[in-house]
Amino acid sequence: GRTAAGVRGIGLAEGDAVVAMEVLRGDATLLSITERGYGKRSNIAEYRRQSRGGKGLITIKTDERNGSVVGIKQVMEEDNIMIITSKGKLIRIDVKNISVIGRNTKGVRLINVEEGERVVGVTKVAED
C-alpha cells in the first residue's frame, strides 16, 4: 500500500555503494569500467541470480591501480561505447575489441587518464 516502507533491495556494507544495475540477457556480456580507465567484459553465465536483500556480486577487482567502479553496461559484440573523463576526454571503442575475461580480474586499460583525471561515465552509442 501507499504507506508501506518497502523491502530491502540490496544489503550494503560500510563504504559500499550501488553503481549500476542491469537485467541480464544470456547472449550478452557485462562491461565493467573503473575510474582509472580499466575495464573488461565478462560472460553473463558467471553471474548468479540475486534475491532481495542480497549482498551483490564482485564484477571487477578494484585497488589503487584501477580505482573504483564507475559503471557497468550490458553489451553485445556489435555495440560501441563512449567513455568520458573528468577533464572532458572522450573516446569511442568497439566492444568487440575489449577482452572477455573472468569476473575475478582487474581488467585491461581502455583509456589513458592523467594525474588528477578520472573516468566519470560510460554509455552505449545509439545505433544508426
Image (cartoon, helix red, strand yellow):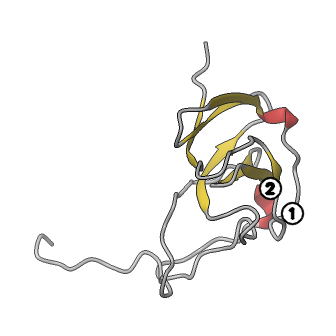
Along the line of sight, the residue nearer the viewer: 1 or 14: 14
- Which residue was labeled with disc 1? 102
Residue at figure coordinates x 73%, y 61% from the top left: 66
**Could you tell me the amino acid type at mark 2?**
Ser
Q: Give the farthest residue toward the top.
A: 128
**Picture coordinates of residue 84 (x, y %)?**
58, 37
**Could you tell me the amino acid type at mark 1?**
Gly
Residue at figure coordinates x 47%, y 77% from the top left: 10
Give the CA distance from mark 2 to mark 1: 6 Å
Residue at figure coordinates x 81%, y 64% from the top left: 106
**Picture coordinates of residue 91 (x, y %)?**
67, 29
Q: Quadrant of the C terminus?
A: top right
Q: Quadrant of the N terminus?
A: bottom left
Instruction: Give the image quarter of residue 125.
Output: top right
**Picture coordinates of residue 83 (x, y %)?**
62, 37
121 left or right of 58? left
- Which residue was labeled with disc 2? 42
Q: Are marks 2 and 1 in contact (CB under 8 Å)?
A: yes
Q: Earlier in the sequence, mark 2 or mark 1?
A: 2
Q: How many marks?
A: 2
Q: Give the farthest residue toward the left.
A: 3
**Picture coordinates of residue 33 (x, y %)?**
67, 52
Label 2, secondary structure: give it. strand
Q: Give the farthest residue toward the front.
A: 115
Label 1, secondary structure: give it. loop
Dot 1, crowdedness within 10 Å: few (<14), some or many (≥20)?
Answer: some
10 left or right of 72? left
